[in-house]
Structure formats: C-alpha cells, structure tokens
Image: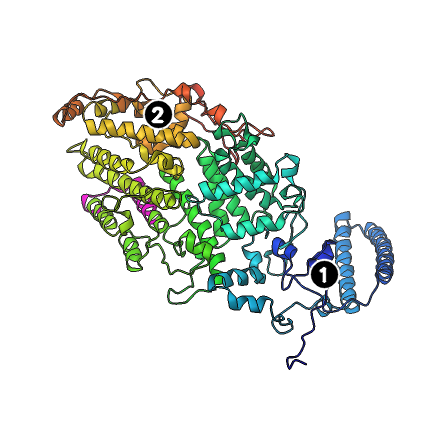
Amino acid sequence: MSSESVVPAPPKRACHQCNKKKTKCDMQRPICNLCARTGTQCVFPLRRKPLTRNGIAKIGSSKSEGALANLMGLLEQASALQAAFTKLGEDQPAARMHLAEAVESLMSSDVARQTQQEPSTAESLAPVTEENRSPPSSGTFSARQETETPSTVGFLQYEDKQSLCSASFGSQTADRALDFGDSGRATITRQQPQGNRFLQLGISSELIFELVDLFFLKIQPWLPLLHRPRFQRWLDGIATGDGLSNAMLTPDEEILLFSVMALSARFSPSAFFAGSPPLQRGRQFAEQARLLQRQLDVSDANGLPYLQACILLTFYCYCSGPTSQGWMLSGTCTRAAYDLGLAEIDGERSLNLDPDPVDHISTEEKRRAWWLVWELDSFASIISRRPFGIDRRRVNVMLPVSDEDWFAGTVRRTCKLDPRLGPAWKTLRDHQIKDEYAWFLTATHFVATISDRFQRKAEIDLDEILSMENEIASFKLALPPNFRIDSHPLMFKEETFARCNRVIGTLLLLMDATYHLNCLSSGKTNPLFAYRVRAAEISRLIRQWPGDYVALAHPFHATSMLSPPPIAPSLVTGVDAIISSSRDLEKLVLSRFRENWILGSVVLECSHILEKGSPPTPTEKQIMWRYALYFPSYGTVELGQSRADVLESDVCHLRAPDQERAAECQSYHLTGNETSTLAPPSSAAVDWCDILPEPVGGDEMDLMLPQIPNGNEIIFPYVNVFGAVQ
C-alpha cells in the first residue's frame, strides 16, 4: 500500500450559477466553463440542501398565504385610515403618505422575520477557497505545471484564475438590473443572454471563424486591441455542436464580433460576399453592431468588451467617410475609458516591481484599449482642429509591449509617456524601448502637442518654435536602429510587414510635425522651402514602401499624404519637379488606400478641392468641415463673417493668382514648368451615399450635408452617436 494518503475527489455537483440557470455544468474546478464565460463567481456546494422540492413548495406556499393575509390586513387598515382622515379633514395625499409608511414598516418586519427563519446561503454554499480546496491528484494540473514553460504556466494560471471575469470577453451579459446599496453605487445583477443574430442572418460559423482570422492577419497589425490566444479560446468555448450559429451570446459579445467582422470583411474572398464590392462588405455587420449598441442601456455599457466594441466601431466610422459618427463615438470611448479607470491603471505601480505574468496579460489588454482610445482622440482632434477630449497631463498608463511578448505572456519592462516633448523621447531611450508601437505612439504625441499649441490663441515666438524643432531632431536621432531606413532598408514580408509599416507611420508623423514647424519658421522668407523639404522626405519614404503592403497599413496614414501648401497648388506643381513628382507619388499611394478604405478617397477629394478652380459644393463643404486640417482658415471665423464665406474664401485664396507669391515662386524656380501627369479625381467619382451604409430603422448613417439657410450660416443638425438627426 502506498504511503501517500488518498485524497477524496470533490463531490460531483453543479455549481450554484448553473443550478440556478438550469443548465448543465461541466463541473471543472476551480471555475466551470459557464462561469468563466459569464464572468460570475463559481461556487460549488459542499453538501446538499436537506429540503426537497415538495418541502420548498410548501414553505413557498405558506409564505405566499402569510403575505396575502398581511396584504389584506394592510388594505383594511388603509381603508380605515382614509375614512378617519376624511372625517378629520385631512386630504388624500396625507393618507397616501401614512399608507406608504405602513407598507415600508411591514416590508422591513417581513424581511427581518425571513432572515431569522431561513438558513444562510453562505452556510450551505461555501466558496472554494485555498483552505478548503482539495489538492489535485498526481498527473493532473500540478504535474502539468512541472513540464510547461513559464509562459505556458502563465496561461494556465490565467485560465484558472477566478478574477478572469474582470477582463473576459463574456464578462458582460444582457438585461442587467441595477441594485443601489447603502453606498449609492450601482451593482450589476447578471442574467442570461438573449438570442443569436448570426443564426437569424444566416451567417455560418465557418464565415465567422474566417473573418476573425482575417482580422488578426490584416487588422490587428495596426489595431492591436485583442489578445488573440484568449479571444480564440473564448470563441472555441462558446461554439456548440452546431458551431457558433447556435451559441448564446450576450449583446456586447455580439457587438464585438460584428465589429470585428465589419473591419475584416473587405479582405474576405468568401462566396457570401459575391457581387459585393470590398468597401461595402462590412456594412451589414456594422449596421448590426449599431443596432445592438442602440438597444443597450446605460447599465449594460460599462465593461471592457463594450469599450473594445466601441473602439472598433469608431475606427470603422473614421475609415468610412466624412460623417459625425466617428467624432461622437470617439467621445463615447473616451468617457467609457475614464469610467473604467483606464487612465490610472499604472498610477500606483513601480517600475522596480516584477509584475505577475497572470495579471500582466489582463492589464496589458486594458492598456491597449486606453492607447487606442487615446489615438482616436488624437486623430479626431488633429484632423478637425478641435480640442482634445483627454487630458494628456493626467495619464498614468505604461506604453504597450509588442504583440509577440503579449501573446506569449512574456513580461517586459516598459515606461510611461511623459507629456513633455523632451522627457518623452528620453524616457524611451533610457529604458531601451525598441518596440515600434511605443515609438509610434510617442510620435503621435509630438504631432498632437504641436497641433494643440498652434490652436491656442496665444502667439508663438521663434524661441518656442526652435525648441520644438530641436526636440523633433533629437527624437529622430534617438530612434532605434530599425528606424534608420537608409542604412537598414525595410524588408517587407508576411512576418515583418506590421513592424515595417509602423516604422513608415512613425517617420510620416515626424515629417508632418517638421513641416508645420518649418512653415512657421521659414514660411515668410521662403514660402516653398518647407514644402520642398516635405516633398523630398515623403518621396524617400514612399520609395521604400511596397504597394502591396500600403493597403495593409494604418488607414490614418492616408492623411499624411496631403498637406496644405503655403501657396496656390497650381503654382507649386509648376515650379519644382520634386514637388510635382512627389504629389504624383502621394496620389498613387492614396489610390492604394482607396482600394480598402474610403478614407483614401476622402483625402483624394480634399486634394481635388485644393486644386480645382470653382467654388466648393455642399458635399465639399462638408468634407472641409470634417477635415479642417487641410483648410486652416476654415476654423477661424471673423466677426461678421459667415462660415459659408470662410469656406469659399479658404479655397479661393489657394487658387488666386497672387502676383507677389507668383514672383516669389519664379525666384525659387529650379528646373522648369513640369506639370503633374496624374489627373486629380473628379468629385463625381466619389459617391458618398453609395459607399456609406444605408439608413436602418429611420436613422441616417450616410453623409450629413450642412444646411445653409439663405446662403449665410452653415447649420449642422445635431447627430447622435450613430448619425440620427435630432
């Protein structure tokens, strides 16, 4: 006989949640599949309740009879009270007040009586803790830990951790009920999910898995939001015998899946999209996500999966044309991120502490969500020349690690993003951060800081401009070796294209920041100097950017392909061969973006507005309003001047044959009268109403055109999060 004592196996009973919901429990310890998916605490009963169903029914019947008798007595007392008050001359509201007090007293006494009579639930259903949990037998989880690598052990511990509900994709469920306790803070009661829209729409499980795989191959490289191993484990876990079509999903889970499919559908060769152009394939999924999001109330919209779905929807809207939906959803993401406390994730963390690999995966996912919200806020404010929604001085969040380290569960030390330009790049250099995503976010911070400084009313002096120019130059010199594309050419292939596109995107952002500063420092003395420097820099970057991988880059990079020239574009293209050829390169790159993203067509249309010689149409005015970065004077309205006048004067100013500027251009003439060989797209070629989603349920999701009463003031109707006119 073995000297080791035989540990009795835990009782085979369903957990409390499965028993309550009348579902079959897989009885996995320490947390079953249903509780892991719904984010509830898994509690297994240690003993059976002594009462039978008949006894419970009798007790429930006796309680109902007692409550009915109390109710009848209360009604008799109320009638007597009302009669007495009528005789005394009191009015009926006083009688109702006394009646309410009597009801409250009766309910409190009844609750106290039930508490004394019934046994406590905690006595019969004790949670499985470290003290009373049965140790695993040999050859199970303990033996498995000895043979696994540290990263794999981290995944196993993460799956077994009961706090998985805080970051699980199934942590939010439908039809929650708010319960306000003594503290006044709302708690959530989770209930069973309702229905499945995939089955109703005839979407097969094979198509869902295909679009999810395409998302991680085509979208995740520039939108690093989801943890792929855990997301796929969750997707496999909810699939039933018939696949995902019959799986019971919560509303936020459906929104998340529909948003993923809306972004990746444009790359799918499935027969499901036969006859549908790539730009329109994701429309139906975005519409379904929009309908589900509208149906959720405030109590449902407070979890990380909901925020992740909103982030994906916001990116979809910003890449789908000049509508207000992206701007409104960006604000929703910002408020939801603050409500989840994501801005203070690392507020009390020290860089000297070794983080737990289990917590690292969950915390990194929240960091990713925060930085994508931060990126959306930056892009929305820069492109429209509006104030930022995030206070960048009060952010305590570490910069993200690479996807490879995150997926493998490898803990890497990182740092926070300093709001000041100088310490920002120094912190990355001192911590030897080499990940391209961290440097890309820092470059975005440089552009956002400079844009915010230019939008202030206070004048900017030459010393401040020179200081920012020095910080940008220092940032470029501090870049890791993989950003030095002249000495280390980029090698684009399937395994490296995501990193290479990050390098190109970072250098494009630094080019934009340098161009805007050069326009201020040398624009008065030499108006073409800044534009020519930009033309040479962007030509150098495009020459190392293969066209096949341009379409897989961040769609926001399309906005870097156009910058407002300091003088009329017609004069610029005819003066310098470098400027003329660089504009052709930019338009060719935009045509590659246009294959998969409507944003590429929007930027091409902005270029056409700058170059054409007629007043802007209402559709063009809408584009100018949404993309005010390319039309700087449109954001400034003089006293007594309407916005319609500013719109027309802003374009006409760039077209006017200013004699003085023409003379300056001729003095800067280098080669001859080379002209662009690539014709700009016509406005008729961009039909926004055909590209953007159609109205569903009476809500307008297509282009919102400005209303111009009497030809004076442009009045934009109020639009809700999904474009419904109020």
Q: Position of residue 578 (x, y in %)?
A: 20, 29
Task: Determine whether, in the image, residue 290 is placed left or right of residue 435.
Answer: right
Residue 641 in the magenta stretch? The answer is no
**Residue mark closest to the camera, 1 vs 2:** 1
Q: Position of residue 325 (x, y in %)?
A: 48, 35
Residue 455 in the magenta stretch? The answer is yes
Q: Amino acid at mark 1?
A: Ala
Q: Is residue 540 above or below residue 658?
A: below
Residues packed near mark 1 inside 10 Å, few (<14), some (14 to 19) or many (20 plus): many
Q: Amino acid at mark 2?
A: Leu
Q: Residue at x 27, y 21 (%)?
A: 677
**Colour option used:** rainbow
Residue 388 appears in the picture as rendered: no
Give the residue at mark 1: 14
The quarter in which the C terminus is drawn is: top right
Q: Nearer the viewer, residue 1 or 536?
A: 1
Q: Residue at x 19, y 26 (%)?
A: 577
Task: Determine whether, in the image, residue 360 is placed left or right of residue 29.
Answer: left
Magenta region: 442-464
Give the residue at mark 2: 647
In the rendered structure, which disc, 1 or 2, sits on the residue that comes first in sequence? 1
Dividing the picture into quadrants, the one containing residue 134 is bottom right
Task: Determine whether, in the image, residue 545 is placed left or right of residue 197.
Answer: left
Could you tell me which secondary element the residue under label 2 belongs to?
A: helix
Q: Nearer the viewer, residue 38 or 109?
A: 38
Q: Nearer the viewer, residue 165 or 656?
A: 165
In the rendered picture of this protein, how many numbered marks are placed on residues? 2
Q: Is residue 683 above or below residue 50?
A: above
Q: Residue at x 31, y 56 (%)?
A: 428
Q: Residue at x 54, y 55 (%)?
A: 167
| Magenta part, dominant SS | helix
Could you tell me which secondary element the residue under label 1 belongs to?
A: loop
